[in-house]
Image (cartoon, rainbow, N blue to C red):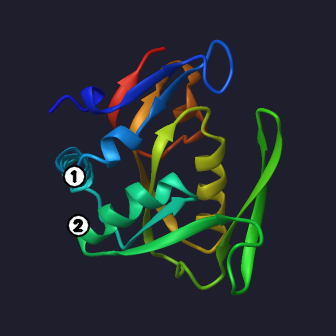
Amino acid sequence: MDFKDSIRVIPDFPKEGISFKDITTLLKDGDAYRQAIDALKALVSHLEIDVIAGPEARGFVVGAPLAYAMGVGFVPIRKSGKLPYETIEVGYDLEYGKDTLAVHTDAIKPGQKVLIADDLLATGGTIATSVNLVEQLGGKVVGAAFLIELVELAGRNKLSGIEVITLVDYED
């Protein structure tokens, strides 16, 4: 299946010059969504994975079903103040400011092998922050899996030493 056929591209959103890749059209199509998760599962099947972590919010819609399909747990990485138990937090820069991600202190055990899953790899800031959180808890990030990679933004350069797996690449 050509997954690009299921991803809507919206020009000049959220600002002029940006070509937004909208996965909601893939998510609402049960067959395409299932095939995308199955395809990601096949692409990461060579990795030894104990748990999958995904950053809020679209990382949940990729990571949770992938974890289910692989028979492993899922760890949500959330924005600051959204998790009810003790957390660790890491701040990172956004295009227009700063943000903070958090994870429960007991979410990942030392030595666990973690796959980070998200919808999109762009500049890599969110994923690099997610890697930082996992590593602070003693986890080992064995890979990062995405539905989409925006190749020209070179986000994978922030993930040195981590295998990056993508279903669809966009050059623009």
Q: Is residue 88 visible?
A: yes
The quadrant of the rendering that contains the N terminus is top left
Upstream in the sequence, badge 2 or badge 1? Answer: 1
Marks 2/1 in contact by CB < 8 Å: the verdict is no
In percent of width and height, residue 64 lies at 38, 66
> 138 or 28, which is in the foreground?
28
Using the numbered discs, state the Cα–Cα distance from disc 2 to disc 1 in whole angstroms.
15 Å
In percent of width and height, residue 51 lies at 40, 72
For mark 1, give the secondary structure.
helix
Residue found at the very far right of the displayed protein: 97
Please give the name of the residue rendered at 79% of the width and 42% of the height, measured from the top-left corner: 93
Q: Quadrant of residue 147?
A: top left
- In the visual, does 171 lie left or right of 136? left
Q: Quadrant of residue 91?
A: bottom right
Label 1 sits on residue? 30
Please give the name of the residue rendered at 58% of the width and 48% of the height, measured from the top-left corner: 127
User: In the image, what residue type sits under mark 2?
Assistant: Ala
Which one is closest to the eye, mark 2 or mark 1?
Answer: 1
- In the visual, does 56 lie left or right of 64? right
> 145 or 37, which is in the foreground?
37
**Above/below status of 136 relative to 36:** below
**Above/below status of 17 relative to 143:** above
**Above/below status of 69 relative to 100:** below
Please give the name of the residue rendered at 56% of the width and 32% of the height, measured from the top-left corner: 122
Label 2 sits on residue? 69
Please give the name of the residue rendered at 66% of the width and 42% of the height, measured from the top-left corner: 125
User: In the image, what residue type sits under mark 1?
Assistant: Gly
In percent of width and height, residue 33 lies at 26, 49
Q: Is residue 165 visible?
A: no
**Above/below status of 157 relative to 107:** above
